[in-house]
Image (cartoon, rainbow, N blue to C red):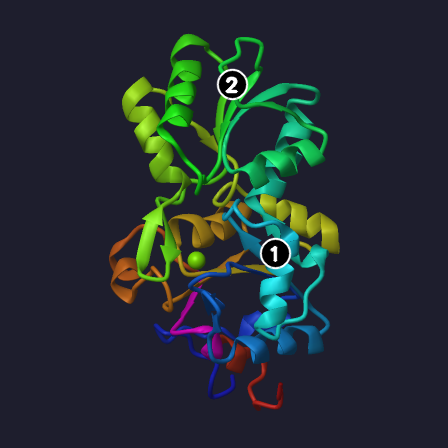
């Protein structure tokens, strides 16, 4: 064991050096808005030096992969389209596999509906009995008429109901704004219908990343700041799940809650030192 191998609770985390596929949440884990946390660049560089790869998995369905690559480039982190798995991608994969050719009623941003259409999925934003399923995403362009349409769809037609992600709130520069999970709670309160969520903690994103990089469950770990999505997705997929305390999760939540990470670190900086115990990576 090396001097930096203990996690926040004193557990030996040296087994992390055997991992080769690292799935990272973004906001609250690696960065906050346009600020990258200390140690993030070193950690990502150390992973590649070990012969590993990193994938950013995000439940945020408002930004396209091109937007995310541009953001990480501004922060000084190299990435390509393969380094991303978003809730929108997970939704597209799911719909293509299970509802090929279906007409999808969508409540979401223009960009979200556009991504679905680009992937060959037929969409409608109008109340339409011929729609096969009802889909809700995070929507920074949400209006009351959209909510009313979706309530009408849910109340009148017994069609399967899906949503991109269960997150209740989404970080903003001043705090938080309602995310898809909260929007769905309004719909559930009004119609009694509950969606099936397709993003984290559903393990589809982890399985997709395994397939993309030909890595096994044992070689993979998931890292994030939110217990009910990031840590839960790792546990649901059977991989190691790491919590960092730079966002939503606190040590107290971990000690008293029922979602228990495999390892916990104060920040990605401490995790970097496990992978690079001699601190040789300089970026
Ligand atoms: Mg986060």
Look at mark 2 in the image and give the residue it sits on: 126
281, 123: nearer the viewer: 123
Question: Ligand 1 near label 2 (Cβ, under 8 Å)?
Answer: no
State the residue in front, 161 or 270.
161
Question: Which residue does the image show at 39% across and 48% down from the upper left?
Answer: 228
**Ligand 1, what quadrant?**
bottom left
Q: Are marks 2 and 1 in contact (CB under 8 Å)?
A: no
Horizontally, residue 81 falls left or right of residue 186, namely: right
7 or 134: which is nearer to us? 134
The disc, 2 or 1, on the residue closer to the chain's N-terminal end is: 1
Does the magenta run of residues contain 263? Answer: yes
State the SS at label 2. Answer: loop
Indicate yes or no: mark 1 CB to ligand 1 under 8 Å.
no
Horizontal and vertical percent position of residue 137: 48, 36
Query: Dot 1: few (<14), some (14–19), or many (≥20) neighbours within 10 Å?
Result: few
Image position, residue 58 (x, y; %): 53, 52
- Does residue 117 show up? yes
Tally of numbered tags: 2
Where are the magenta residues, as a range?
A: 262-270
Please name the residue that numbered disc 1 is placed on: 67
Q: Where 121 falls versus 48 (above or below)?
A: above
280 and 27: which is toward the camera: 27
Give above or below for 151 relative to 205.
Answer: above
Q: Residue at x 50, y 34 (%)?
A: 108
Please name the residue shown 34% across and 72% down the image: 9
Residue at image point 68% right, 51% down: 210
Residue 256: % across, % down: 24, 57
């Amino acid at each position: 064991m090396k001097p930096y191998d203990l996690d926040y609770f004193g557990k030996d985390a040296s087994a992390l050096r055997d991992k080769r596929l690292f799935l990272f949440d973004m906001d609250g884990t690696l960065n906050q808005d346009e600020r990258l946390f200390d140690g993030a660049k070193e950690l990502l560089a150390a992973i590649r030096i070990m012969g590993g790869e990193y994938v950013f998995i995000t439940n945020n369905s408002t930004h396209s992969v091109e937007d995310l690559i541009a953001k990480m480039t501004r922060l000084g982190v190299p990435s390509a389209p393969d380094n991303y798995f978003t809730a929108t991608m997970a939704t597209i994969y799911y719909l293509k596999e299970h509802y090929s050719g279906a007409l999808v009623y969508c409540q979401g941003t223009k960009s979200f509906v556009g991504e679905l259409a680009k992937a060959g999925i037929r969409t409608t934003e109008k109340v339409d009995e011929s729609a096969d399923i009802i889909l809700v995403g995070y929507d920074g362009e949400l209006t009351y008429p959209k909510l009313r349409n979706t309530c009408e769809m849910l109340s009148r037609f017994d069609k399967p109901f899906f949503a991109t992600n269960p997150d209740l709130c989404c970080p903003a520069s001043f705090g938080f704004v309602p995310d898809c999970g909260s929007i769905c709670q309004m719909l559930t309160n009004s119609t009694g219908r509950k969606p099936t969520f397709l993003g984290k903690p559903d393990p589809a994103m982890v399985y997709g990343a395994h397939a993309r990089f030909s890595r096994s469950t044992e070689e993979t770990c998931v890292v994030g700041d939110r217990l009910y999505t990031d840590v839960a997705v790792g546990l649901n997929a059977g991989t190691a799940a790491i919590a960092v305390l730079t966002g939503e999760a606190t040590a107290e939540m971990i000690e008293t809650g029922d979602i228990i990470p495999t390892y916990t670190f104060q920040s990605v900086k401490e995790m970097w030192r496990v992978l690079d115990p001699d601190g040789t990576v300089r970026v």
